[in-house]
Image (tube, helix red, strand yellow):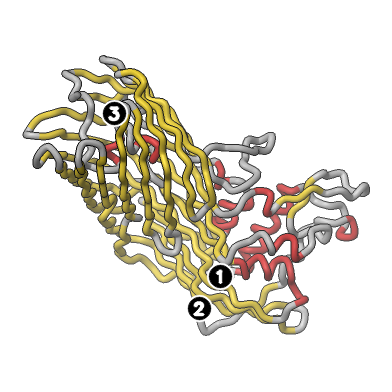
Amino acid sequence: MKLRLQIIILFLLAGGASTNILAQTLSSSYFLEGATFRHQLNPAFMGERNYISIPLLGNINVGTSSNVGLTDFIYKYNDPESKYDLTTFMSSSVSREKFLGNLKTNNQINTNFGLTILSAGFYGCGGFNTIELGVKSNSSVNLPYELFNFMKTGMDQDVYHIKNFAANSNNYVELALGHAHEINDRLTIGAKLKFLVGGANVDTKIDQMDVELTGDKWQIMANGIINTAVGGGYYKMKAENPDEITGFDVENNVGPAGYGAGIDLGATYKVGDNLILSASVLDLGFINWKNSLKGATHNNEPFTFDGFNNIAVDPEDGDPNSVDEQFENMKDDLEDMTKFYDEGKVNRTTTLASTVNLGAEYLFFNDKMSLGALTTTHINKPYTWSQAMASLNMRPARWLDASVNYSYSTFGSNLGWMLNIHPKGFTFFVGSDRMITNVTPQYIPTNNFNTNICFGFNITFGRCRN
């Protein structure tokens, strides 16, 4: 298992970002009273009935979001001398202006995986109680514009200043105990306490990388760190320089990498007979990572870099490489562009990526339909994002809920939907907050990597709350 900065490039350039494992359940379920797991969005939401999830199938959510897409990096190649139909942005057939004009100052990709292993909800103790055991995996990468400017422009510019080059992956098991309580017929409050067991954490940051042309080589001065916490993990070192990190591996004695705690808080308030206001703050907490491996750049030691010279993308470079080979060579060159040195083991504490939800719902047609508005802010610098969603929610039958919505976020606009079937005895739901529109033959989104899917089966029992 390699580490260094190919972690970053693999997310984007090797296609992993679209299949890797930001919320644990759908935002589309926020205004559906029959949705079993909407208490994960606001702990003040009470269940329609008691429930027990089917192990490993109760709630599964996989998704990505980004402000860049495949078409920003891969282009059609019309050269008759080439045996390939596609090439990367490094080809001379792709102009600098065309490629860089599509990029943002910070190009972000976020991926998430949420799996509920086991969950139960029941009425008692004056309210609605939940017990959950699940797995969360959240990964983010920030690729600055200036990095791609350096790769594409090369020696046509003498100096580059690359900032905020970062990647993070946080993976843990969560045991949560929740309680929602009606203060009166208008106000409901809720809280959820969480015990966390850290599985793995990688945090890479290069705050500043100065690249200057000296002769036919580049001189690089970098200021960055890399922290890695995996039970039984260790850095691999360069033979001729035993302090320089070349990769990462794991011994057989894999175990918990850390422990932590968190809390969710929420409230709902009914204004008159038709308007419901709600708010929640999720994942206020931390994980303490024990024996975390630390690496850092040598800030006062510049080193030389040959540049991106090994990527054959045009006939004059020899036999052009396939797109996969071009990305592999980019990854190898990026490894040579970065040097981290071992600084031993440390105990460190990281905060969870918190989320703030603010909602308003207006009911009509005897509560058979409603209009909802939801704003979401996900706080996780430098990967913070926000979203605003407008939702039409329908309940044509007592056992059937549906929602269609439109949202606009840091990563663009999206259409979402959810279908929730919940007769007495069981529930089944499926939906997506970010619909796929155009994909490649490999089912990779061609525009922004904005897609997710969530579904689950659960057993319900007891009297319906309504």
Q: Is residue 7 left or right of residue 199?
A: right
User: In the figure, 355 relative to 338: above or below?
Assistant: above
Classify mark 3: helix, strand or loop: loop
The picture places residue 50, in percent across and down from the top left corner, at 20, 24
Find disc 1 in the rendering and name its residue.
Answer: 339
Residue 446's mark? none
The residue positioned 51% from the left and 69% from the top of the image is 164
Classify mark 2: helix, strand or loop: loop
- The amino acid pointed to by label 1 is Lys
Residue 298's mark? 2
The residue positioned 69% from the left and 64% from the top of the image is 100
Q: Is residue 138 left or right of residue 64?
A: left
Q: Quadrant of residue 176?
A: top left
Cα distance in 3D space between marks 1 and 3: 61 Å
Find disc 3 in the rendering and name its residue.
Answer: 367
Question: Is residue 20 visible in this depiction of the protein?
Answer: yes
Mark closest to the chain's N terminus, 1 or 3? 1
- The amino acid pointed to by label 2 is His
* Contact, mark 2 vs mark 1 (Cβ under 8 Å): yes
Cα distance in 3D space between marks 2 and 3: 63 Å
Q: Quadrant of residue 420?
A: top left
